Amino acid sequence: MVEYGSPLYIYSHGQIVSNWQKFDQAFGGHPHLICYGVKANSNLGVLSVLANLGSGFDIVSIGELERVIAAGGKPERCVFSGVSKTKTEIHRALELGILCFNVESAAELDSVESVAKLMSTKAPISIRVNPDVDANTHPYIATGLKENKFGVSIDTALALYKKAEHSQHLDVFGLDYHIGSQITEVSPFIEALEKALELISKLKAEGIKISHIDIGGGVGIAYNAEKTINIEQYIRSVLDKVGDLEVILEPGRAIVGDAGIFVTQVEYLKQSGVKSFAIIDGAMNDLLRPSLYGSYHQAIAVEDNSKGIKDTWDLVGPICETGDFLAKDRELTLTQGDYIAFMSAGAYGFVLSSNYNTRPRVAEVMVSGSHHALVRKRETVSSLFENEFIFNDEIN
Ligand SMILES: *Cc1c(COP(=O)(O)O)cnc(C)c1O
């Protein structure tokens, strides 16, 4: 901590590896590809660990694809998701040779086809269907209901596959869906799978061959010892249904979530009689999940501190917003200068951080046994406005 400063994200190499291997091993000899959901944590250090394991990647922008390649990942193991791929992005992805476009609308299918035609090539595609299942998660991260913006209905998908099958510039590969994030029960996944498999057999009857099914990400983790999905059991029930179809899986949170912590330092303690605040140097701009989704992260004092003040604290940051809190009503014994670790902050932590209040984004460190190394240096204040210009209002 002293070496890297505060606040700080710290990732465990060993935990990332074992989380990935758990998914990989659950498939046994069945053809599969784990495509890590890059948006959960796109740090080059994290991506390089996964690339070394032979992981695939699920990307949602060309920027993420460039990161994956910079980290040593293979474009031919990347699937490209997202509701709005621009023609420039499609062009670059085709140039780099990705595994598959997960197409999300009729208009996007047209774009992919026209870019492929321009490049005199064939674009590998999968259609993202929206299976209309309730994943029972936070509304901001539910994606598989028919009122969500993602994918196309099963009926529309059938028409799009027929069109794609007849195109000289599209190669039909797969079918995909992703029903949401932080899902803690298997049943919505199985419901979605059954609907998707029904469509695949309809397609087969039409002479359209699907060679992989991409079952998305969304596997939830335990933020506060809650019950969540048993991965082996989930994959077993998938394998029971898919026959010999290759399976692609896109876990993000479940790979990196519990492999990261966010460490902050107590700046001031402020007790009003009504409420006790521990004002910490980390804020909503560093870890947005509590403010955005009302999410819970365990907060643990890094060192046992018997000299401190025992109270029920709200852990709040220095940002000028009442919504700037990382945790509420936590019983902790604290003094000024103590370090507090927010647990399971490896997913949707740093990636959602911003420079609000002109706060430099924090450093990120990877730890492996006794070895530790910076994987992103802390931003400097001057770098935050280096792309801005003084406006000269004396020119008419
Ligand atoms: C966000 C996302 C993922 C990863 O979701 P997790 O909940 O982090 O596993 C996978 N696939 C797609 C299409 C996504 O948008």
Image (tube, helix red, strand yellow):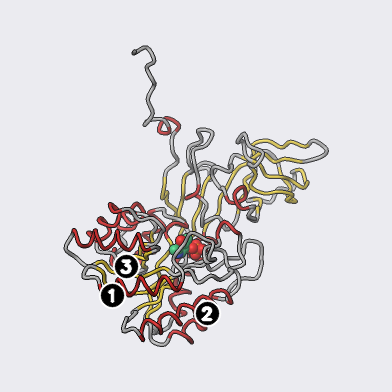
Among the two numbered marks 1 and 3 on one chain, the one whose residue lies closer to the N terminus: 3
Q: CA distance from mark 1 to mark 3?
A: 15 Å
Q: Residue at x 28, y 75 (%)?
A: 165
> Residue 322's x, y, as percent?
67, 39
Circle 1 packing at 10 Å, graded few (<14), some (14-19), many (20+), is some
Element at badge 2?
Answer: helix
* Residue toward you, 12 or 390: 390
**Amino acid type for the residue under numbered disc 3:** Cys
Q: Does the beta carbon at disc 1 come under 8 Å from ligand 1? A: no
Among the two numbered marks 1 and 2 on one chain, the one whose residue lies closer to the N terminus: 1
**Amino acid type for the residue under numbered disc 1:** Glu
| Residue identifier under label 2 | 232
Q: Mark 3 and mark 1 in contact (Cβ < 8 Å)?
A: no
Among the two numbered marks 2 and 3 on one chain, the one whose residue lies closer to the N terminus: 3
**Amino acid type for the residue under numbered disc 2:** Glu
| Residue identifier under label 1 | 165
Q: Residue at x 30, y 74 (%)?
A: 172
| Residue identifier under label 3 | 100
Q: Taking the image as drawn, is residue 15 in sight?
A: no
Q: CA distance from mark 1 to mark 2?
A: 35 Å
Q: CA distance from mark 2 to mark 3?
A: 26 Å
Q: Residue at x 28, y 59 (%)?
A: 93
Q: Nearer the viewer, mark 2 or mark 3?
A: 3
